[in-house]
Amino acid sequence: MSNSASGNAALAARDLKHLWHPCTQMHDHDIAGKDRVPMVPIVRGEGAWLVDADGRRYLDGISSWWTNLFGHANPRIAAALAEQARTLEHVIFAGFTHEPAIELAEELVRVTPPGLDRVFYADNGSAAIEVALKMSFHYWLNQGHGEKTRFIALTGSYHGETLGALSVSDVALYRKTYAPLLLTPFLAPSPDAYEGQPGESPEQTAARRLGEMRTLLERHSLETCAVIVEPLVQCAGGMRMYHPGYLTGLRALCDEFSVHFIADEIAVGFGRTGTLFACEQAGVSPDFMCLSKGLTGGFLPLSAVLTTAGIYEAFYAEYNAGKAFLHSHSYTGNPLACRVALETLAIFRDEPVLERNRQLAAHLTRRLEPLREHPHVADVRQTGMIAAVELVADKTTRRPFPVTERRGLQVYLHGLRHGALLRPLGNVVYFMPPYVVTETELDQLVDTAIAGIVHAVAGRSGP
Ligand SMILES: *Cc1c(COP(=O)(O)O)cnc(C)c1O
């Protein structure tokens, strides 16, 4: 079967002839040897599983880049999408509207933290960040504060890869090359608990980092529009986690110094951290909340920026005052995507999703516990349905494996050979499965990851 015109080998060869993939050194697909990365053609998905063109199955341990919530090809969402496609596929969203966009805005206002009453759509996560940055700047401009042109971001943060979103990101892999093109934010040290001082609790780390944020704001708040953070988990930066107290303190600091609080819940929203939104765990409402990824259950690209009535009002004026917010994408408010997002939210209403996730998360905690003893594991951490294992060369000093050794890649390749999609971020092996995963499937995922870790840390440079 693998030699057929529609098998893995044939599709991979056709792919590699014309396609250019994201986040990929294409050379990795063409080399021989143990570091060769296969191009895997997927023909079908069902539940937590992906099926390739040779009929091999992969348990999707990372929800296909953190997008999927209720399983691949979820029949309920698929049916809603098909019906919408037969009714209205798209319409210009300036001067025109439609019920899926209206109803989705109503639902988002209802389920997000209090005070977020306005919804602006875009079509991917990075675009939502661009919208939030521009809106924050423009709000201050409309209020007579054109001197506010800067942003504060956290070290280790990731907010996307378009130029504005990349500007407020601090993951060297993505940012370094393009730095000459970017805005320069002020960087505040992340409250990341892994980087805490010895003997310090996550709460104490958060408090100390708030002190440093205060110092930065004392110096720069007059020129600063907003502070942007990934609430509770800095995902692409290595699934680094921090105490919710940081968000509570940050809310107070933003109020005290008159800067906006932008919560990027693109990855952590929709239940990943145990609550529907991560901000809930700190009891805070941001000035802007960016949503995407899980918003459509992993079906279609869509994003939303929620903001307050107060911010909206600063743009609301007679036409020639020139205060309108200018940002448009052709596919803004796409009806198919909105309809699919509505069905996703309906599943949250109809099924005890967060309750079931609590059990799954507890199971994951138990299964990962033994890894703490592993000689190359420095940290096992978890926030709700996100769990991560930090691999190091030396457990006592926490000296990382050199990135050039690509240990994580060996875990990825081991996973593929054993029916699991695990895609470590450097030396961080993480789990962010779709919510339809079963405990048995989680066992399988963890067992494969552990075997992959053992395989990856063996050989080459030692401890
Ligand atoms: C993925 C991600 C983005 C960017 O979303 P895209 O749709 O990939 O552009 C922004 N912020 C966070 C926290 C993300 O994880």
Image: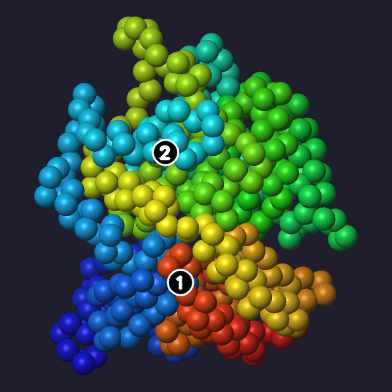
- Mark 2–mark 1 distance (CA, rounded to whole Å): 26 Å
Numbered label attached to residue 108: 2
Q: Which is more toward the observer, 163 or 318?
A: 318
In the displayed image of the protein, which residue is found farthest to the left?
86
Residue position for label 1? 437
Residue type (three-letter) at the residue carrying disc 2:
Leu
Position above or below: 364 against 101: below
The picture places residue 161, in percent across and down from the top left corner, at 45, 49
Which of the image's four quarters has the C terminus? bottom right
Q: Is mark 1 within 8 Å of ligand 1?
A: no
Position above or below: 450 against 149: below
Which of the image's four quarters has the N terminus? bottom left
Q: Give me the residue at 65% from left, 22% from top.
A: 258
The answer to whether the residue labelled 2 contacts the one labelled 1, judged by CB atoms less than 8 Å apart, is no
Residue type (three-letter) at the residue carrying disc 1:
Val
**Disc 1 packing (10 Å; few <14; some 14–19; many ≥20):** many
The picture places residue 3, in percent across and down from the top left corner, at 20, 91
Q: Give me the residue at 50% from left, 81% from top.
A: 440
Image quarter for residue 73? bottom left
Q: Which of the marked residues, 2 or 1, is nearer the chain's N terminus?
A: 2
